[in-house]
Amino acid sequence: PYVNWALILANFAVFLYTLTLSTQPTDVFALQRVSPADVFYYHWGALPACISNYFGFSNGVDPRLLTAVCPSGDRAPLTIFTSMFMHAGWAHIIGNMLFLWIFGDNVEDTLGHAWYLLFYLFCGVVAAAGQAAIAPDSPVPMIGASGAIELAASLKMMEQGVIYPTLHLDEVSPECTGIRHVTEPIRAKAKTLLKNGFAFGGINAALVFKKA
């Protein structure tokens, strides 16, 4: 599964580069003192406000703020792809890459190398689009491969006919007793999938897929 390994290496390469950037507020960006690391995240992370503005959707954001934080030219759509390879810390990247290592090679074996790469990027685009649709006025960069990885893992479960449990779920809150929590693997031929992604900053996006 060399495509999966290449994706993992690319994610780690970008993350290790970000570790070389200073976190001291020595730069000026959007009229604020920020660090070179912050500037990198703003330049290459996907900002929902910039994406929605680029595609002509009204988001109510001050045009002066958009001018200050959004990438120049036609680079806003590109950040949807570059943001997939950026992570905020060790816990962030290790968690994502662990899931990609476990599930990605199986999906690649099923789809083939080229289709797997296209599928991975497509999942990331769909996740970013969902987030931008939910919070089109957010100027906070979206980063991480969670959307692509979670969709790949979820669709693999659909393909295998297995729903895997939530780990370490020992006690359910009384407010959630109406939900059927999966505590052990269930054999089920699921035809519809809802992937709920909770991102940094409290922005929630849900995607629904239906098996043909």
Image (spheres, rainbow, N blue to C red):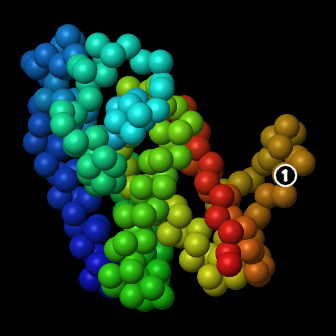
Image height of 121 relative to 163, above or below: above
Q: On the rendered structure, is 138 left or right of 33?
A: right
Quarter of the image for the N terminus: give it: bottom left
Of residue 161 and residue 47, the one placed in the foreground of this image is 47
Q: Residue furthest right?
A: 178
Q: Residue at x 47, y 75 (%)?
A: 103
Quadrant of residue 89 within the rendered picture: top left
Residue 89 appears in view: no
Q: Is residue 87 above or below residue 202?
A: below
- Mark 1 surroundings within 10 Å by alpha-carbon count, few (fewer than 14), some (14 through 19), many (20 or more): few
Residue at 47% x, 18% y is: 60
Specify whether 43 is left or right of 162: left
Residue 211 in picture, x, y percent from top left? 67, 75
Q: Is residue 19 visible?
A: yes
Instruction: Estimate the x, y position of residue 140 in percent, counting from the top left.
Output: 38, 29
Residue 144: x %, y % from top left: 37, 49
Look at the image and tell me in which quarter the C terminus lies.
bottom right
Depth check: 63 or 163 in front?
63
User: As rendered, which of 143 and 60 lies closer to the eye?
Assistant: 60
In-front residue for pair 20/3: 3
Relative vertical location of residue 163 with respect to residue 42 in this rendering, above or below: below
Mark 1 — residue?
A: 179
Q: Position of residue 125 (x, y in %)?
A: 42, 55
Which residue is depicted at the point 19% across and 53% down? Answer: 14
